[in-house]
Amino acid sequence: MDQENYDFLTEKLKYTGFEDKLNAALKKEINSDKEEFSLNLPMKIDGKEMQFDLHFKKSQVSDRYFFNKYDAKLFGEEGAEPKVHTFYQNQGVTAKESFNLLEGRGVQKSLVDSGNEPYKAWLQLDLSKKDSRNNFEVNQYHEKYGFDLEAKLKELPILELKDDTKKGWMLKSIQKGNQYPVTMEVKGKEEIMFVEASPKYKAVNVYDITFATVKVSDLKLKNDTLKENSQEMGEAKEQSKKKGLKEEKVEGGKIPKRPKTRKSVKV
């Protein structure tokens, strides 16, 4: 067995989110010297059942094997048809990200174009359409598409945005397609909600603690109203101060004048 090739493949599996669960089976298949083989792994992610089928193929010019792709199958409710999609290694999609994509959420990835130039794009599956390979159609939203995740989050009364470290964790998690728990200030009270990216609509989706949809416009309106009210209160205080100065009186009802500075006189 090519130890270097085995080590390389186990690193790939670890990066993709399978840890060392398939290492023993991988070593056995490599030693069998097959032209190609598959490894199967059931997993539970966020309480839902998934099945992964990983495909390996030997090089035509050497004894090295390559991990080319994997099929991800997400099982729904009993009797419902599972969602199945094949992810290729050049996409760099992890097991957890494949789950998020099959759930319908967007995932941001660093990719390379035909000219070998790197760029970032959001990937999102169209779960209503299948292509010729029986895969869901993959919609790609380039970084120039105009979806600014951080800007959209800042439109909401999210307390974690006030802490740079917590904000960084939140952004990274949402970019991986996760529904992220945040604390929002609503009507003067703190409430736990969940946010996720919606790159197609250049927006974020919000859910309450029961995962019921929350209207983002209502949260934005409340947040904007709080800002407007704060601004109006500040302006009112300023006006009140000015008015108070004007209403100061002395005997005879006259506003006091600032005394003139007397010049010193030499004697």
Image: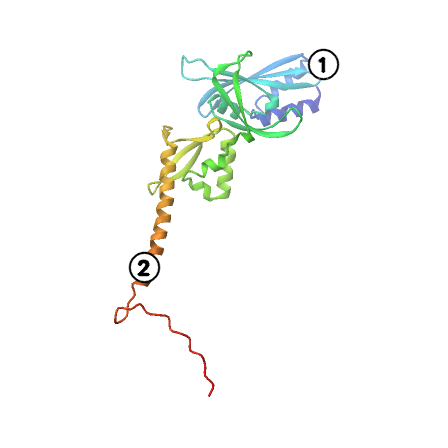
- Residue depicted at x 48% and y 37%: 151
Q: Position of residue 156 (x, y in %)?
A: 41, 38
First along the sequence among labels 2 and 1 = 1
Per the image, the residue denoted by label 1 is 60
Label 1 sits on a secondary structure element that is loop
Question: How packed is label 1: few (under 14 Cα within 10 Å), some, or many (20 or more)?
Answer: few
Q: Residue furthest right?
A: 61
Residue 64 picture quarter? top right
Q: Position of residue 171 (x, y in %)?
A: 50, 35
Coloring scheme used? rainbow
Question: How packed is label 2: few (under 14 Cα within 10 Å), some, or many (20 or more)?
Answer: few
Check disc 2 and give the amino acid type: Lys
Q: Position of residue 98 (x, y in %)?
A: 52, 23
Q: Is residue 128 above or below residue 112?
A: above
Disc assigned to residue 243? 2
- Could you say which is closer to the camera, residue 237 or residue 102? 237
Query: Is residue 170 among the parts visible in the rendering?
Result: no
Q: Position of residue 75 (x, y in %)?
A: 45, 17
Query: Is residue 101 among the parts visible in the rendering?
Result: yes
- Answer whether labels 2 and 1 touch (C-beta < 8 Å): no
Residue 199 located left or right of residue 244: right
Check disc 1 and give the amino acid type: Gln
- Could you say which is closer to the camera, residue 262 or residue 149? 262
Q: Is residue 43 above or below residue 241?
A: above
Q: Is residue 109 above or below residue 188?
A: above
- Residue depicted at x 57% and y 18%: 70
Q: CA distance from mark 2 to mark 1?
A: 88 Å
Of the two numbered discs 2 and 1 in the rendering, the one whose residue sits closer to the viewer: 2
Label 2 sits on a secondary structure element that is helix
The quarter of the picture where the N terminus appears is: top right
- Could you say which is closer to the camera, residue 19 or residue 187? 187
